[in-house]
Image (tube, rainbow, N blue to C red):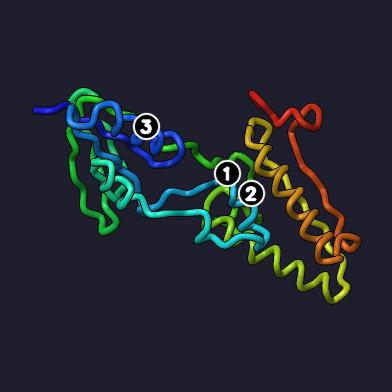
Amino acid sequence: MKPQVVILGAGFAGHTAALHLSRLVRGKADITVVSPRNRFTWFPSLIWVGTGTMSEEETVFELAPVYHKIGVDYVDGRAKVIDAAARVVTVEARDGTATDLRYDYLINATGPYLNFEGTPGLGPAIGTTASVCSVEHAVDARAKYLEIVAALKKGQRRTVVVGVGHPAATCEGAGFEYLMNVHADLRRRGLRDLVDLVWLTNEPEVGDFGVDG
């Protein structure tokens, strides 16, 4: 029996691993990618979705056709349990059914945990703030941003705060880029003078990006 390689996640890390392994061990091992929603997201472009400059459809593509083409199995589901001793990962499909996948080699590339609750009162789930950390978040951020634009067009001033939360947050890059996108978009619309734009950061100095918190 061929070695079984299971990759959890199909973001930049998982998808890159699948592409390279399909080239390096194709025919010598069976490769399976497990990831929900059957989509790869180009996360850097979500900062454009959040201002309405780019559509969400332009930031994603379906995974299944790509993996079929390169000889990789794809499971549309979410890893729920890893039994390292038995070398089995339990995968839950969208309909709630669970399947056990045996593996000889496992790559865990499920990505970061978005720790909004690290700052009490923060996060799109409770409706207090917007985010551009996922497609759904960016679409919500776009809606909130365009509401602000509509108010500005009526001559109403607004304060817009862009930044990060708790002191250990280390993803200032996306926030800073989104800040610049908001600034540029408001200038294009001739509305920049009506907005107090604030950058909230834990950086010891601007440009540090909070490396190591």
Q: CA distance from mark 3 to mark 2?
A: 33 Å
Q: In the figure, 76 relative to 15: above or below?
A: below
In the rendered image, the quadrant that contains the C terminus is top right
Please give the name of the residue rendered at 69% of the width and 41% of the height, measured from the top-left corner. 164
Which three-letter amino acid code belongs to the residue tagged 2?
Answer: Leu
Please give the name of the residue rendered at 44% of the width and 41% of the height, measured from the top-left corner. 11
Tell me the mark number nearer the camera, choosing from 3 and 1: 3
- Looking at this rendering, what residue extends furthest in the bottom direction? 154
Q: For mark 3, what is the residue?
A: 17
Is mark 1 in CB contact (under 8 Å) with mark 2? yes
Query: Image check: 212 left or right of 69?
Result: right
Q: For mark 1, what is the residue?
A: 117
Query: How would you rate the neighbour count of disc 1 (Cα within 10 Å): few for under 14, some for 14-19, many for 20 or more?
Result: few
Q: Earlier in the sequence, mark 1 or mark 2?
A: 1
Query: How would you rate the neighbour count of disc 3 (Cα within 10 Å): few for under 14, some for 14-19, many for 20 or more?
Result: some
Say what secondary structure mark 3 lies in.
helix
Q: In the figure, 53 relative to 212: above or below?
A: below
Label at residue 122: 2
Query: Image check: 104 left or right of 46?
Result: left
- Looking at this rendering, what residue extends furthest in the left direction? 1
Q: In the figure, 165 relative to 38: above or below?
A: above
Say what secondary structure mark 2 lies in.
loop
Q: CA distance from mark 1 to mark 2?
A: 6 Å
Q: Earlier in the sequence, mark 3 or mark 2?
A: 3
**Image x and y of residue 47, in percent:** 64, 51
Say what secondary structure mark 1 lies in.
helix
Please give the name of the residue rendered at 43% of the width and 48% of the height, measured from the top-left corner. 40
